[in-house]
Image (tube, rainbow, N blue to C red):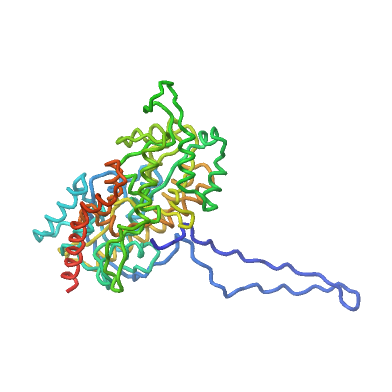
């Protein structure tokens, strides 16, 4: 993802020169004239005042813009929220009213399908039937991306109003998901609050870390020095284990380094560890890059973390993971930013750090989970310019007000009690990304989740696992490229 600061520079202060006193040759005091300190240096606008390139005189005569989204709280909220007194709800409500007034439109959220596939299938059925039911599509990345090559969404290349050079669009992220250097049919940016909420992170319990002879500041410094690695995670996790009930058995009432699932978390471990599953030719056409020594070695490391560390408790229950952390039953919570919503009543203070490095020479990274929302415009729309201008305005205003409300005032202030966590959250957000193979996994015979498959099967036998999916993955990629070329042609 294109690196962008969450806090823009504030207006620079003006230094005022005070009159200086000296002594003339005649011994009388001589006062110098005040110095003119006016400067031609331009200051950077604050985040909330960052301008967009939309014309000032746009007026769409009360057009109703219908936005279809998953019927799940996190997805409905980022599209349409009521004033509730909650800082996020109010920011989204005010954003929508500002855009409606600016463009003379009305915004309507149409929640459709609680499941990602239900949502995507309803959109496909509508568009394939030629129905003009929706103007903007908001859907899970893993379902909308393959659909974008089916010809049901509009090519956004050369759009009159959408300006990918603006900081509210995640242009590097979009490029990673494209096939080739030409058309694109989807968007992601600051309008997708769910994309930020779904970034990988690790929560740690400040009380428990001190029982291991380490302070929160020391753990933060380990991260900031670039030394937060799998070796360190393994060591802390192992040290945290306590047989609380004394029955010499590993059960969920004991204290652990962390509770973890065999689904979801392996994805975030793998794609933050320096694994690059896709390479591209000079035309931007992707190829698979999974069968590498780096990935094979990494999977052995991940296997050992899951199955050879007594401080790890494997479960399929995310609520158990979160609840045990909240009640001081685990040192770490391996999850995403969104888990902070479930920790509001936690008594012990916690901090936030990134996923560890597989090797010290890599950079820290964060994966945006594939359930995060991306956006598209159906080919059935009849007011393309008006809709694209509305998307630009919504994303720009999200950058100015909604993201600061969530990221600065909620995540970094309300849920976290120290300034260093805020600094590290900035670092995580700026390093967040996706991967082509991960994002298109379900069209690639499961290649993007091979890590999850191996952890599920409790195996380090990459050769046989890869052999079972390679042909289907290569065929799936060929089909994706063919679909892209048909659309481009």
Q: Position of residue 478 (x, y in %)?
A: 19, 64
Q: In which quarter of the image is the C terminus?
A: bottom left
Taking 348 as reference, is 131 above or below it? below
Q: Where is residue 264 in the image (x, y as percent from the top left)?
A: 31, 45
Camera-nearest residue between 115 and 254: 254
Taking 465 as reference, is 344 above or below it? above
The answer to whether 454 appears left or right of 297 in the picture is: left
Q: How many labels does the image show?
A: 0
The answer to whether 57 appears left or right of 351 in the picture is: left
Taking 263 as reference, is 282 above or below it? below
Q: Quadrant of residue 311?
A: top left
Q: In which quarter of the image is the N terminus?
A: bottom left
Camera-nearest residue between 159 and 104: 159
Q: Position of residue 29 (x, y in %)?
A: 86, 72
The answer to whether 440 appears left or right of 399 in the picture is: left
Q: Where is residue 108 in the image (x, y as percent from the top left)?
A: 23, 53
Q: Residue at (60%, 64%) from the top-left corner?
A: 13
The answer to whether residue 345 is seen in the rendering is no
Q: Which residue lies furthest to the right in this view?
A: 27
The answer to whether 105 appears left or right of 399 in the picture is: left
Camera-nearest residue between 8 and 52: 8
Q: In which quarter of the image is residue 42?
A: bottom right
Q: Residue at (49%, 39%) from the top-left corner?
A: 236
The answer to whether residue 373 is seen in the rendering is yes
Taking 328 as reference, is 107 above or below it? below
Q: Residue furthest bottom?
A: 25
Q: Residue at (91%, 74%) from the top-left corner?
A: 27
């Amino acid at each position: 993802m294109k690196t962008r600061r969450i806090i823009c520079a504030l207006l620079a202060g003006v230094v005022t020169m005070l009159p200086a006193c000296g002594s003339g040759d005649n011994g009388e005091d001589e006062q110098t004239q005040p110095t003119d300190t006016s400067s031609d240096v331009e200051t950077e606008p604050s985040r909330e005042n960052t301008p967009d390139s939309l014309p000032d005189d746009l007026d769409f005569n009360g057009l109703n813009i219908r936005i279809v989204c998953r019927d799940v709280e996190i997805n409905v909220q980022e599209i349409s929220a009521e004033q509730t007194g909650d800082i996020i709800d109010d920011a989204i409500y005010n954003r929508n009213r500002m855009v409606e007034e600016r463009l003379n439109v009305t915004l309507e959220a149409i929640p459709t399908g609680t499941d990602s596939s239900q949502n995507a299938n309803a959109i496909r059925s509508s568009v394939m039937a030629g129905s003009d039911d929706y103007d903007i599509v908001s859907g899970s990345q893993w379902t909308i991306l393959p659909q974008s090559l089916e010809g049901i969404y509009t090519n956004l290349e050369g759009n009159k109003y959408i300006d990918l050079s603006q900081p509210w669009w995640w242009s590097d992220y979009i490029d990673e998901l494209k096939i080739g250097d030409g058309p694109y049919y989807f968007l992601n940016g600051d309008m997708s609050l769910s994309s930020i909420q779904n970034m990988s992170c690790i929560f740690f319990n400040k009380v428990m870390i001190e029982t291991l002879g380490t302070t929160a500041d020391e753990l933060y410094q380990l991260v900031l020095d670039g030394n937060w690695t799998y070796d360190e995670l393994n060591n802390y996790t192992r040290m945290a284990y306590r047989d609380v009930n004394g029955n010499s058995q590993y059960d969920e009432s004991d204290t652990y380094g962390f509770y973890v699932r065999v689904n979801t978390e392996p994805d975030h471990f793998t794609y933050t560890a320096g694994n690059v599953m896709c390479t591209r030719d000079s035309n931007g056409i992707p190829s698979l890059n999974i069968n590498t020594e780096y990935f094979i070695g990494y999977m052995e490391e991940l296997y050992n973390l899951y199955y050879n560390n007594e401080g790890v408790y494997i479960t399929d229950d995310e609520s158990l993971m979160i609840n045990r952390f909240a009640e001081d039953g685990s040192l770490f919570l391996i999850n995403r930013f969104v888990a902070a919503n479930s920790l509001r009543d936690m008594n012990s203070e916690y901090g936030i750090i990134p996923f560890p490095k597989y090797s010290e020479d890599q950079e820290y990274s964060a994966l945006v989970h594939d359930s995060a929302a991306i956006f598209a415009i159906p080919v059935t729309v009849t007011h393309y310019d008006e809709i694209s201008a509305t998307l630009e305005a919504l994303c720009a205003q999200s950058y100015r007000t909604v993201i600061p409300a969530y990221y600065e005032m909620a995540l970094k202030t309300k849920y976290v009690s120290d300034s260093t966590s805020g600094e590290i959250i900035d670092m995580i957000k700026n390093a967040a990304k996706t991967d082509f193979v991960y994002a298109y996994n379900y069209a690639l015979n499961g290649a993007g989740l091979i890590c999850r498959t191996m952890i599920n099967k409790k195996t380090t036998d990459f050769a046989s696992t890869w052999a079972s999916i390679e042909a289907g993955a290569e065929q799936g990629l060929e089909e994706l490229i063919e679909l892209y070329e048909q659309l481009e042609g």
